[in-house]
Image: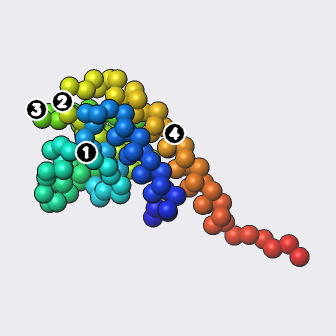
Amino acid sequence: MLTLEHNIVLNKICELILDINQKTCFVGVINEKGRILESKHRSGVLACLSNTKQEMFFMEYALRQMMRKEFDTEFGSVRYTYTEREKEVLFSFPLNNLLVVVSCRIGVNPVSISRKIIPIIDECKFKLDEKTSFEKELEKPRRILS
């Protein structure tokens, strides 16, 4: 379960990535079941999809990510994926057990934009890990000194 602090970090990820480029239309963080945990958007195809189609879209991304993990031992972990469609380009970036999905209008430079997004993801991974470690520390039983 995500804490308020985790949600703040996820919200910041979405804001920072959306601000990278004016052609960025959507940034969302989804869980392993494809449920949106946090998102920010301007406009674009994703915003026009019905709720049912959006759910299917994100579930498909989550499923692909789970399947990609099957090959991490052989190839190493995925840094990001890039898909170019006729109307928009799509990226996905693993974030611990979550996935950041980014949609941009055609015309963005995929290498340039991914190089700007990866440091944001990496910093937020650290912040999420740091918060999780701190929470685990708090959950440990304490010995009361007498």
Q: Which mark is residue 42?
A: 1
Find disc 2 in the rendering and name its residue.
Answer: 106
Secondary structure of the residue carrying numbered label 3: loop
Nearest the camera: 138 or 111? Answer: 111
Q: Quadrant of residue 106?
A: top left
Element marked by disc 1: loop
- Residue 86's disc is 3
C-alpha span from label 3 to label 2: 8 Å
Quadrant of the rendered image containing residue 38:
bottom left
Q: Amino acid at mark 4?
A: Glu
Disc 4 and disc 3: Cα gap in Å? 32 Å
> Upstream in the sequence, badge 1 or badge 4?
1
> Mark 4–mark 3 contact, CB under 8 Å?
no
Are the residues at dot 3 and dot 2 in contact (C-beta closer than 8 Å)?
yes
Element under disc 4: helix
Q: Position of residue 27 (x, y in %)?
A: 31, 45
Tell which circle, 4 or 3, labels the residue nearer the N-terminal end.
Answer: 3
Residue positioned most to the left: 86
* CB under 8 Å between discs 1 and 3: no
Kind of residue at badge 2? Ile
Q: Earlier in the sequence, mark 2 or mark 1?
A: 1
Residue wearing tag 4: 123
> Mark 3, residues whose alpha carbon is within 10 Å: few (<14), some, or many (≥20)?
few
Query: Which residue ends up furthest to the bottom in the rendered image?
Result: 146
Residue type highlighted by circle 1: Arg
Task: Tell me the quadrant of the picture where the C terminus can be found.
Answer: bottom right
Q: Is residue 51 left or right of residue 116?
A: left
The answer to whether the residue labelled 4 contacts the one labelled 2, judged by CB atoms less than 8 Å apart, is: no
Which residue is rendered at x = 13% and y = 51% of the image?
Answer: 48
Residues packed near mark 2 inside 10 Å, few (<14), some (14 to 19) or many (20 plus)? some
Q: CA distance from mark 1 to mark 4?
A: 24 Å
